[in-house]
Image: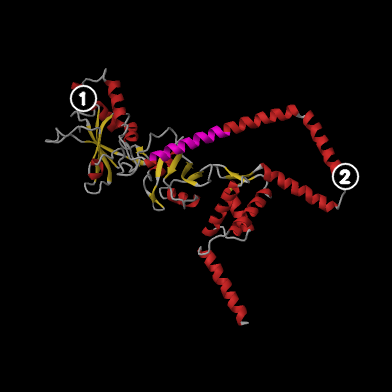
């Protein structure tokens, strides 16, 4: 009895160590799991392919392993990699695991052998005759149905080509976003925008008339104060919202930390643009927040410093280091211009522990309900790229979600940008 009790305790200790990840997977465990993976795909609906997450749950369950255990997930990953090396399965960028043709034919061959074993022992002559008959039938069918097969093949090829082109376009878009994440924040596009605006209005606006009094602006003020701005605001987004009349911007930030206060001073082309902006744009929502606009006349002694020499300046050490471009401080890439009716965002710089539930809760913090989430994976390895796309039910929800650009999610500042 004592020997039995001691052996049971040893077994319990081993099981605890396996759950804690102290005991690593062996080659035998990987090989047994690979057979379970192939059997699971063969027993699926189409018998050819399965989604990666669905396959992992089914295969681990078949092998009596816990799907929520990290060591089991690592074991499954090793098994998938070994099957890919042996060219038994292939993993697409969309997370679909497909059986190779050789494995499909093997499954068919095994089923026919089982049927022959059930029927009982047969002579070699009968087997040869059956094989010949089958070949003849196949040849006759191929001869009659050549035209139909060609039409079906051409249709399938067209569908595959369109799907691949769409997938390549999305993947290329994702890689450009990833490259932007790796780069430091550069010079913003406000220079080009302001120069274009100046070129457009050179023929109509005289520099002498810049501060000319007009209706709604009797003092001819061209400097405006902007308040209640979103922390993810960027120069192109703000300039577009102000009807492309901005020539200079100064973000108001903390002198020591460089933290953005959500307000700014901006210079517009002339007094008429200032009056129009105050009457038409004041109180309108920008990225989900109603902005406040007031006249900000230049005080005595500020004439030399305003308008500033640079098109975009920021208070504090952060901006002076040459990392302007976005109001939200250092390390956050400025968002591109929002497309009309945009309901989809690119999300990058994500933790590898991210899942659908975590990203949904993250955006629900600003009352932005997710419609769909799609993660991106490497074609060759099947590893998570650390980025994806999120669809929202409305453009208003999309704007609310965009305000979280640069916020920490699972210990990493999330990168958000508009996408079609």
Percent across and percent down for residue 167 are 53, 36
Q: Is residue 376 above or below residue 146?
A: below
Pointer 1 residue = 210
Percent across and percent down for residue 254 are 23, 47
Q: Nearer the viewer, residue 275 or 34?
A: 34
Which of the two discs, 2 and 1, labels the residue nearer the N terminus? 2
Percent across and percent down for residue 165 are 54, 32
Q: Residue furthest top?
A: 203
Q: Looking at the rendering, which quadrant does residue 225 occupy?
A: top left
Give the main secondary structure, helix, strand or loop, of the magenta stretch: helix
Is there any visible trace of residue 395 in the rendered image? yes
Q: Nearer the viewer, residue 234 or 41?
A: 41
Q: Looking at the rendering, which quadrant does residue 154 occupy?
A: top right
- Helix, strand, or loop for circle 2? helix
Give the residue at x 23% y 26%.
270
Residue 264: within the magenta?
no
């Amino acid at each position: 009895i004592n020997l039995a009790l001691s052996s049971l305790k040893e077994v319990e200790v081993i099981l605890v160590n396996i759950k804690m990840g102290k005991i690593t997977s062996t080659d035998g465990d990987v090989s047994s799991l690979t057979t379970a993976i192939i059997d699971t795909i063969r027993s699926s609906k189409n018998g050819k392919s399965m989604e990666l997450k669905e396959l992992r749950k089914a295969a681990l369950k078949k092998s009596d392993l816990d799907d929520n255990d990290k060591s089991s997930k690592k074991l499954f990953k090793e098994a998938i990699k070994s099957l890919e090396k042996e060219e038994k399965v292939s993993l697409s960028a969309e997370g679909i695991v497909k059986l190779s043709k050789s494995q499909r034919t093997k499954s068919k061959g095994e089923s026919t052998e089982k049927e022959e074993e059930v029927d009982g022992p047969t002579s070699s002559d009968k087997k040869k005759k059956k094989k010949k008959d089958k070949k003849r039938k196949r040849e006759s069918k191929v001869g009659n149905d050549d035209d139909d097969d060609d039409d079906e093949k051409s249709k399938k090829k067209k569908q595959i080509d369109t799907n691949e082109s769409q997938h390549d376009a999305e993947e290329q878009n994702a890689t450009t976003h990833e490259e932007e994440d790796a780069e430091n924040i550069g010079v913003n596009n406000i220079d080009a925008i302001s120069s274009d605006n100046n070129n457009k209005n050179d023929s109509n606006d005289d520099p002498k008339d810049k501060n000319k009094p007009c209706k709604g602006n009797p003092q001819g003020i061209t400097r405006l104060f902007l308040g209640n701005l979103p922390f993810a605001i960027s120069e192109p987004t703000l300039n577009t919202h102000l009807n492309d009349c901005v020539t200079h911007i100064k973000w108001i930030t903390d002198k020591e930390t460089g933290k953005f206060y959500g307000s700014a001073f901006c210079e517009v082309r002339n007094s008429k643009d200032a009056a129009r902006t105050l009457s038409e744009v004041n109180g309108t929502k920008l990225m989900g927040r109603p902005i406040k606009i007031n006249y900000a006349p230049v005080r005595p002694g500020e004439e030399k410093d305003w308008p500033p020499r640079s098109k975009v300046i920021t208070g504090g050490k952060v901006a002076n280091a040459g990392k302007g471009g976005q109001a939200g401080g250092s390390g956050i890439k400025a968002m591109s211009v929002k497309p009309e009716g945009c309901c989809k965002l690119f999300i990058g710089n994500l933790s590898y522990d991210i899942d659908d539930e975590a990203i949904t809760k993250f955006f629900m913090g600003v009352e932005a309900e997710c419609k769909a989430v799609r993660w991106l994976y490497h074609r060759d390895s099947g590893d998570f790229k650390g980025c994806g796309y999120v669809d929202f039910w409305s453009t208003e929800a999309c704007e609310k979600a965009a305000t979280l650009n640069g916020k920490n999610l699972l210990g990493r500042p999330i990168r958000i940008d508009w996408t079609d």
